[in-house]
Image: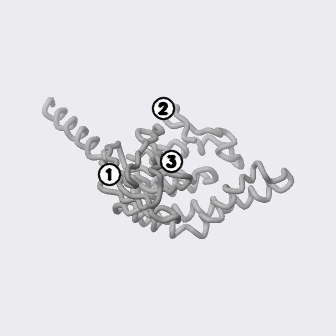
Amino acid sequence: MTKSICLLLASTISTVASSQISFTLKGNFANQQNPVIYSEYLDKEKSVTDTINVSNNRFHFSKTISEPVLSTLTANNRRTNFFLEDGIIDVDFSTYASPVIQGGPLQKEFENFIFSVKDVLYPLKNIYDSYWWKLFPSSSRDSVYDQLLALRKQMTQKISAYLKTHRNSIIGTWAAAENYDEATSTEFEEILSHINRNHAYGRKVLYLYELAKKTAVGKKIYDQDLAAKDINGNFFR
């Protein structure tokens, strides 16, 4: 019995350790005055901001975190999203266009996924960028809100289809966690069997599924809980 327990503990420790990732961010600027770069992401379900200094128009930053996650990189009012994962991640700020990211397999999957849903993602982004809840008169908000609901439903369907062919995908699980607002309990059930439950994004989906089951029919999830919290009571947004 003691031997079995020791083997189980060793296996558990090995699983936890193997889930960690070590990454290096490196890159360059052109004709810049050594700006400061900020990398924002969640680690162990808590917000983290790394400050990366630039010297002679170049930067190099290494770190180990608990698991692969989406990061938002910001410098001189320019920002981009990419996945932190094992290995070297090259970031090119040498042009005035969007920064160019060269990462590993997870980053490539992220880019391919975004491309595959762009027909829904871009209209969604246009609504969010318009701050319709502030700028639109109350008389037209219902119409815009209906458009938003329809688009989010389409996105959930796309995510569900993606996860069926990319079971346990961190990218698909991240997308499901980000698009939970308007999904019904039935749509969540279709997603649950394909998400990566060991990742923080998967735990968020599971939490939101339980929240959806408690929500009355015809009532939006965030009407009941505007600021959803994780299992530790921390706010997701």
Give the left or right position of residue 222, taking residue 55 as reference.
right
User: Helix or strand or loop: what does disc 2 sit on?
Assistant: loop
The residue that disc 1 covers is: 24
Q: Is mark 1 on a helix, strand or loop?
A: strand
Disc 2 target residue: 232
Q: How crowded is mark 2: few (under 14 residues within 10 Å), some or many (20 or more)?
A: few
Q: What residue type is labelled 2?
A: Asn
Q: Do the residues labelled 2 and 3 touch (CB within 8 Å)?
A: no
Q: In this view, does 231 lie above or below 127?
A: above
Q: Residue shown at 64%/45% (left/top)?
A: 221
| Amino acid of disc 3 | Val
Does the rendering let one see residue 194? no
Q: Which residue is drawn at 32% across and 51% down?
A: 24
In the picture as drawn, the residue positioned furthest to the top comes out as 2
Residue at mark 2 to residue at mark 3: CA–CA distance: 15 Å
Judging depth in this view, the residue of 34 and 137 nearest the camera is 34
User: What colour scheme was applied to this rendering of the protein?
Assistant: one colour
For this rendering, which residue is in front, 128 or 162? 128
Q: Is residue 84 left or right of residue 72?
A: left
Give the Cα distance between marks 2 and 1. Answer: 29 Å
- Separation (CA) of disc 1 from disc 3: 29 Å
Reply above or below: 22 against 99.
Answer: above
Figure quadrant of residue 118: bottom right
Which residue matches tag 3? 205
Dot 1 amino acid type: Thr
Badge 1: residue crowd in 10 Å (few <14, some 14–19, many ≥20): some
**Mark 2–mark 1 contact, CB under 8 Å?**
no
Q: Which of marks 2 and 3 is nearer the N terminus?
A: 3
State the image coordinates of residue 206 (x, y, percent, origin top left). 49, 45
Q: Earlier in the sequence, mark 1 or mark 3?
A: 1
